Image: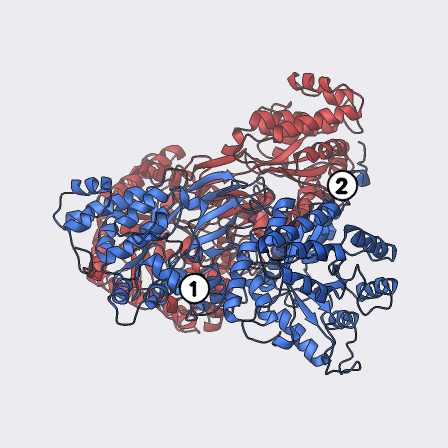
Chain colours: A red, B blue
Amino acid sequence: MVKPNLQMLKSQDSHWQQGDHIKEKISCNDADNSNVGHPQCREHAKHLRRRPRLREAMEHRLASGDPWFSLEFFPPRTPNGATNLIARFDRMALGGPLFVDVTWHPSGDPAGERETSSLRIASIAAAYCGLETVPHMTCFGQSTAQVSHNLQKVKDMGLRNLMALRGDRLQEESENSHGGFHHAGDLVRHVRAEFGDYFDIGVAGYPCGHPEAKSYEEDVMYLKEKVEAGADFVITQLFFSASSFLKFLADCRRAGITVPIIPGIFPIQSYDSLRQLSRLSGLAVPVQLRLAVEKVKDDDAAIRNLGVDLAVSLCQELLTAGVSSFHFYTLNREFATETILRRLGLWQQEPRRILPWAISADARRHAEEVRPIFWAARPKSYVHRTQAWDEFPNGRWGNCASPAFGELKDYYLFYLKGRASKEQLLMEWGPKLTCEQDVWDVFTSYITGNPNRHGHKVTCTPWNDEPLSAETLDLRDWLAKLNERGVLTINSQPRVNGESSTHAAFGWGPPGGFVYQKAYLEFFTCAENVKALLLVLKRYEPRVNYHVISSQGWAVTNLPDFQSVAVTWGVFPGNEVIQPTVVDPVSFTYWKDEAFALWTERWGKIYDEDSQSRSIVSTMRNSYHLVNLVDNNFPFTSCLETILEEMFVARSAFHGVLAGNVDEADDGPDGGKETTQTPTDGNCE
Amino acid sequence: MVKPNLQMLKSQDSHWQQGDHIKEKISCNDADNSNVGHPQCREHAKHLRRRPRLREAMEHRLASGDPWFSLEFFPPRTPNGATNLIARFDRMALGGPLFVDVTWHPSGDPAGERETSSLRIASIAAAYCGLETVPHMTCFGQSTAQVSHNLQKVKDMGLRNLMALRGDRLQEESENSHGGFHHAGDLVRHVRAEFGDYFDIGVAGYPCGHPEAKSYEEDVMYLKEKVEAGADFVITQLFFSASSFLKFLADCRRAGITVPIIPGIFPIQSYDSLRQLSRLSGLAVPVQLRLAVEKVKDDDAAIRNLGVDLAVSLCQELLTAGVSSFHFYTLNREFATETILRRLGLWQQEPRRILPWAISADARRHAEEVRPIFWAARPKSYVHRTQAWDEFPNGRWGNCASPAFGELKDYYLFYLKGRASKEQLLMEWGPKLTCEQDVWDVFTSYITGNPNRHGHKVTCTPWNDEPLSAETLDLRDWLAKLNERGVLTINSQPRVNGESSTHAAFGWGPPGGFVYQKAYLEFFTCAENVKALLLVLKRYEPRVNYHVISSQGWAVTNLPDFQSVAVTWGVFPGNEVIQPTVVDPVSFTYWKDEAFALWTERWGKIYDEDSQSRSIVSTMRNSYHLVNLVDNNFPFTSCLETILEEMFVARSAFHGVLAGNVDEADDGPDGGKETTQTPTDGNCE
């Protein structure tokens, strides 16, 4: 028998170790989590697997040579600006930035609670938009206590990254300010001393030299000090030519700086940019560049195009030279940066979804693996209502998670507000409602994409801030017919039986896996329909799970109180089955408060207080029921369509109308026939 | 708008309540578990769903009219008898008893630690055989402290049921014995006073009157007292005619006794039974019965058949009268009771599996929902090694569960011992081993079912105490070829892609579900094969997960330390995805200790200490590697067969032998060709 050459078998792809050693390694050890009981261990393990730290992600991407980018934003001046910026975060997230950073405005109460404060914006980007976020922080002129307080606040917000900067010298403060923070390096040292390894720290590099530096060489040595103090990566200030950066990079490497150095790219977006550029760099703008911009200074589009062209050339030159990461100074605008990234091929066309819903980048939520489907179109509200949770369901939805659902009374919060203005909503949802069917028509227009009778497209509803998702498009015709008949759908998914995890519409998770869904439908409808539906559902036990609930809280379900049903799951190589979306009776009772309130909070309130329109909305809120249906027989054609048809038939039967008439109504173009035959309070006619 | 008639919508099938009321109910309240933190709540919820309390199960079965049975055993006199009884429990469990009960032998240290003690046997039946178990307990002549101590012990063993009896008056004790327990009712009251609702309590009923009772009527009133004291069900002593029981039942109901009353059936199994019967009942055996038995008293088979016939007639009469439950006094024998149950159609032909493995009836393990596949054929060892766990993985296999694996050094424990005697093992595994291939032949015979070269069938191996499972039969030809060539398989499952949960071989869980498996193979093989295999496996990343480990603990895997892979899962109506079987690197390192030790503990030790046979087994233990393979691509034909073929090819290549020869070897009847060409230490030739 030949003894194996154990060392020979070792490979980079596999973990090779003494088996008994694994046993010792099991007692997990998380520096910032002294409570290493069972759930924490599990979270730690999942965390390692799911979302690497920023510096690990950077190293991984740099090692693979796979190009990536990051985006810099500044805090807006007004609450409205904050709302718009959050919407921008969501859109820019689709492109797949490795991280975003938010600048620190010392004069704007950067660590305060206002919606325009630097840290507030950064924490929203992470927790609510799922972006890996790096808040900036400056130290100059601040006391040690103040800096420590701010750092603790960053940590408490679930952020694990920091861009450590000195900050501008304020005129009123002397060089020997209190606190002893003279350089960014002092801040880096302070962070490491007080918070150990908790933060991933970025620092600034100056390829064209720091305006206050005595020499370029001194500047490189100064950067080396910052890195030696504990910085994990470098983002450069802007520069005007690829060669400046490449020289700087080479000089840094020669000086022994080994951490990632990311070139900062500044797309010129307006004539005004020239001044900003000059101010930010502290450098004179090269004459050729100034002349090129001035030549088209009255043509905004031409300047933007010029800026895009210049940035694309610069990046392409760097790519050719082997640089694979780019940091964009967006100036809070989308168009130029997105255009540059698309032209470079760096904008993700089909973003990979790790889970069917966007994972929060809040470090406290790293173990989160499952959510109720109810908030699918309102993920920010879900994150908001569960922000006080200290344990997130890890793969299984326990009953215990639910009691801590926070109230949602804060519809006005900038990160929960709808994107459309009241004026736009009046156009989309109608300036005046005269009957319930006017409301049905709004739902129908939203589903079909056809303009409403005022000629406006309906791009959102109180329950859906975005247009229909790709996977719902397949259900569009059926959903349109339901809404025409007063089954007002607000959430749905088709059944999926083992599609590839890379499927364009249904895929999520790592490649090589298989994803599944149970057909799901959630809608508001009147009490008569509910009565008929419940009779029909008796014949579909136990195939179909259902919940019906009124705004007053009367509920009926065929699920036990604490039982949840997985409606989306995936099977992957080397993994347990991941089941990220569930339906359960308990969280449904919390969701219903929100779902019913949206009638009046979002829709009713766009009309005058005593108007008929607002009254119709209130009446529907009070009299309609919220229903959800799950077809458990996912390998076969869904029966939900049949059930709804049988509901219409059964309802007609209540009114002594021959069942056959309902089928005729189906074929009618307006779908209003059945309603016409059985008028009820508040309906048209 | 018509308001729904909410009460009208209420149905027995559905939970109807005020939705907001559900929120209040969430704070779960388990009488015997004051620690109602998150995991406990979850366990409670699962527990309610998975395994109802005995009295709930009884009520459910009685309400449905679905007949059921229970089995009574007594503690054996010898340790060998205990081993045999455990094996009998396993076999009788297949018939689907609702519970088993174990009698209390006051003179045999019933609450002691010996393997023949009443409580030890009862706890083994529950924890290791998965049988819902009711230990008997008598009280007469015992102190309150002693009884409380015994009850606490029952609870500590994870048993939730009790048969409360007075017990025989011992001659040496006076009527006014210490403790004040004069009647079973005193014990019932004591249990309720001290343990509240924790236990489900059974008491005895006497259809033919208690031998010491003044009258039949007094006896019924006495039973009523016991029930009013808190008993949940009644098991009757034996009776001779259906009419006795039916009259007793009617009298009890008339007296206001509403709990289940289960008739005790005593099959006459031998001439000796007559005496037992008389002693147990305290009644004279009816003359006709005595005459019938005496007529065939020298013919054991005839007596047994008579006993079966009489019991079947009695039960059929009771069934006709609407009785649907039967308690069998088995006298620790199988044949008669099983025959009666089969003839009555009560013996489960295809036992429904709640999970792919038998769930322990130990109340402390109610939340257990997932196990590593490694112990699939050694579930008792797994339960033993995890008996100290206080939290069981609930649906997800966390890394934290593993460190507490107990050592397995107790191969001699009566409930862990193999069933075959040393003599039988010598016949099956060979009285003398001369080379490693003799060992391969044993594995091959076990797989094929063909006799070994000594003409004996191989019914077990050190790793498999039972013959091949139904699902493995499909893999038999392939596995046989592997074993012939020195890939010694000890565990395997075929891939399954969404079979019905009621499928005969693969099904488990409630009906209406779909079950899945990833192909799995586990085997011992020599280091040369491992070397070749690891080369081949590089081409199957990430499709195939693997672990290779030596007895010294050198291990290689392509799974991260704390990552587990679900290899069996099921999707059911109204449920999350259940994933009861996993593969993970950490528990594999614990399993390997056991798997390697079994070579010497089970196999080597049947040979003399200095024999060549024992030496060969030891050498294999020390030089072979343990390997497991998971094919993650479950919807498609498994690639494991191809991988093993490629391994043989690669191994031949190491030896400069043309790969083609291996394919020829495949077709050979003995499969030993390759080995013949490349002899290694210890092999034949």
Q: Nearer the viewer, mark 1 or mark 2?
A: 2
Specify whether residue A431 is in view.
no
Chain at numbered mark 2:
B
Q: Please indicate whether residue B269 sits to the left or right of residue A204 in the image.
A: right
Q: Please indicate whether residue B652 sits to the left or right of residue A653 in the image.
A: left
Tell me what residue is drawn at x 76 percent, y 41 percent.
B11
Q: Which residue is mark 1?
A: A170
Element carrying mark 2: loop
**Percent from the top left, x then y, of residue A29?**
42, 68
Q: How many marks?
A: 2
**Percent from the top left, x then y, of residue A245?**
25, 51
Seen in the picture, residue B430 relative to A538 is either above or below; the reply is: below
Seen in the picture, residue A173 relative to A438 is either above or below; the reply is: below
- Residue A213: assigned label: none
Quadrant (top left, top right, bottom left, bottom right) of the N terminus of chain B: top right
CA gap between label 1 and label 2 equals 73 Å
Specify whether residue B421 is in view.
yes
Is the same chain shared between marks 1 and 2? Answer: no
Q: Please indicate whether residue A178 sits to the left or right of residue B450 in the image.
A: right
Q: Nearer the viewer, residue B198 or B399?
A: B198
Choose top left, top right, bottom left or bottom right for residue B462. bottom left
Disc 1 marks which amino acid?
Leu
Q: Nearer the viewer, residue A159 or A163?
A: A159
**Percent from the top left, x then y, of residue A31?**
43, 68
Quadrant (top left, top right, bottom left, bottom right) of the C terminus of chain B: bottom left
Q: Which residue is mark 2?
A: B11
Q: Please indicate whether residue B543 sits to the left or right of residue B469 in the image.
A: left
Disc 2 marks which amino acid?
Ser
Chain at numbered mark 1:
A
